[in-house]
Image: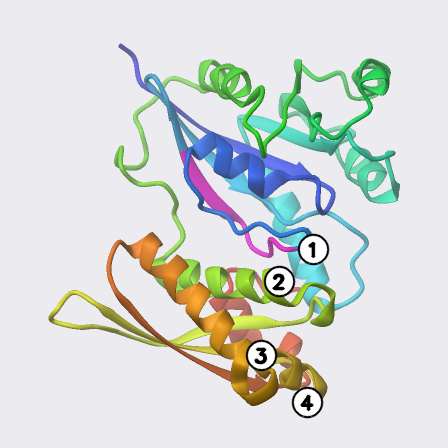
Amino acid sequence: MTQRCGLVAVIGAPNAGKSTLVNALVGQKVAIVSHKAQTTRARLMGIALDGESQMLLVDTPGIFAPSRRLDRAMVKAAWEGAEDADRLVLVIDSSVKLGSKAEQVMAGLEGRSEPLVLVLNKVDLANKGNLLGLAQSLAGRLEPEEIFMVSASTGDGVAELKHHLAKAMPVGPWHYPEDQLTDATDRMVAAELTREQLYLQLHAELPYAAAVTTEKWEDRKDGSAVIHQQILVERDSQKAIVVGKGGSRLKAIGQAAREAIGDHLGRKVHLFLHVKVAPRWGEDRGLYEDIGLDWAD
């Protein structure tokens, strides 16, 4: 059998379900997921296998109108993740009307040479009567090579999409070992898993502007890991929300994050969280490198 390997850029508006789709294609969680828009910040690569094909899936940040430096860096990362891809996978949330953010993404696709695959996601939540019309309308505008109707959260249609992408990959040797699922470092994944808990547990209470960095990592002789992380927020009021009454919220976040990181590493984890108020953390050039983004002017 001939090996194939190629790059697949997964793009779309915030909350279209890109990270859920990447996780479904990989077959294991490699990208954090929440109902909060703009959860993905950096170009995170998941590695999916199908037969003799290895697909390097770039889970890009959602594309939107940037206002702050962090926003500009995220949008830049999204479009850079699409450059030279063997396939672009445009994910559209089929359960809601096309909004300005989806329109912005589609406008950005005009004139691009990469072959496009259109994925209508969340079909389990969509009005079935509207799906065919939406597919026909977008087919006329975007001229994709194929359209898939999937539910990344339930797995419906994912296998067919994965098989199509596998066949589309160019002939060539695999870039990563068979058992490697992501190119993200353990430090980065650990920080992302803690940030995911902030979103899951605080919902609308905590604004989008929060970051997590892994400050210290010690591998003990007994096989466990001691990890110190810092949660950065912009105001004292946000710190109070994260910490909670008597530290209860921070303890709950830490416990859930510790379990998630332990599951990812396959070993025991001792996690220590500290919350710091840094009003201008979005202007810290070093932090961008920690979270996997390029500095944006």
Q: Nearer the viewer, residue 155 or 82?
A: 155
Q: Please say whether residue 140 is one of the residues in the magenta stretch.
A: no
Q: Visible in this render: residue 184?
A: yes
Are the residues flagged by discs 1 and 4 in contact, CB closer than 8 Å? no
Q: Amino acid at mark 1?
A: Lys
| Magenta-highlighted residues | 39-47
Q: CA gap, disc 1 to disc 4?
A: 22 Å
Q: Which residue extends farthest top?
A: 1
- The tag earlier along the polypeptide, 1 or 3, is 1
In this figure, which residue is indicated by the disc labeled 4? 236
In the rendered image, residue 94, in percent from the top left (x then y), is placed at: 77, 29
- The tag earlier along the polypeptide, 3 or 2, is 2
Q: Visible in this render: residue 84?
A: no
In the rendered image, residue 277, in percent from the top left (x then y), is placed at: 62, 87
Q: Is residue 288 left or right of residue 56?
A: right
Q: Amino acid at mark 2?
A: Tyr
In this figure, which residue is indicated by the disc labeled 3? 232
Compared with 251, 96 (above or below) is above
Task: Report crowding for label 4: few under 14, some 14 to 19, many 20 or more residues within 10 A (C-alpha).
Answer: some
Q: Quadrant of residue 20?
A: top right
Q: CA gap, disc 4 to disc 3?
A: 11 Å
Of circles 3 and 2, which is in front?
A: 2
Q: Quadrant of residue 89?
A: top right
In this figure, which residue is indicated by the disc labeled 1? 36
Q: Is residue 215 left or right of residue 110?
A: left
Compared with 143, 206 (above or below) is below
Q: Secondary structure at mark 4?
A: helix
Residue 199 — which label? 2
Q: Amino acid at mark 3?
A: Leu
